[in-house]
Image (cartoon, rainbow, N blue to C red):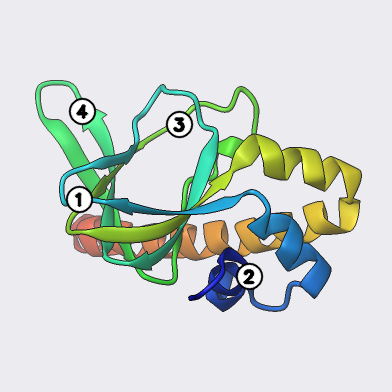
Amino acid sequence: MITIDELVGAHPFAAGLSDEHLALVAGCAQNVAFDAGAMLCAEGESADTFFLLRRGHVSIEVHQAGRGPIVIETVGSGNAVGWSWLVAPYRWTFDARALEPVGALAIDGACLRAKSFEDPALGFALLSRVTQELLGRLQSTRIRLLDLYGEHRG
């Protein structure tokens, strides 16, 4: 049987973490599953978890009045979902919905924040990974915006 430590260590987000740091992250993790259509998180609710996706796809959505949910990105296996656990006031700023059955590691944000305060090297390692992930997402958004609006510019 595969352990949580092994699952965390196999996820791309954890690549390069020391064995000690992997054990600290794994100590805050649990293996979870979501059915298609299930919400991993909902805008405005308490952000106390982030997810390392192991299988399946998740849509990242925002709501527009009168229009309902708008998908801003779709992510899958190997990606992480949810950074709101890292920044006060720890509230989700988007929805994340399983598009199909999803397997993930749910990482307790409060647990990980506490461990990061105790071990600043862990905090830096995690923040570096989050920043890298966010930069990739911003680049993807930039490309989508150029595709949408690039040909209409003067």
At label 3, counting other C-alpha atoms closer than 10 Å, the crowd grade (few under 14, some 14-19, many 20 or more) is many
Q: Mark 1 points at which residue?
A: 35
Q: Residue at x 61, y 64 (%)?
A: 132
| Pick the front one: 127 or 110 | 110
| Sequence-wise first label, 1 or 4 | 1
Q: Where is residue 73 in the image (x, y as percent from the top left)?
A: 30, 55
How far is disc 2 from disc 4 in space, using C-alphas? 34 Å
Q: Which SS class for mark 4? A: strand
Query: Horizontal placement of 48 versus 67: left or right?
Result: right
**Can residue 154 be seen in this snapshot?**
no
Using the numbered discs, state the Cα–Cα distance from disc 1 to disc 4 in whole angstroms.
Answer: 25 Å
| Residue occupied by mark 2 | 14
- Tell me the element at label 3: loop
Q: What residue type is labelled 1?
A: Asp
Q: In which quarter of the image is residue 108?
A: top right
Which residue sits at x=58%, y=37%?
85
The amino acid type of the residue labelled 4 equals Gln
In the rendered structure, the answer to whether residue 88 lies left or right of residue 120 reads left
| Residue receiving disc 3 | 92
Tell me which label, 1 or 3, sits earlier in the chain: 1
Left/right of residue 89 with respect to residue 60 in the rendered view: right
Name which residue lies at 28% across and 55% down: 58
Q: Nearer the viewer, mark 3 or mark 4?
A: 3
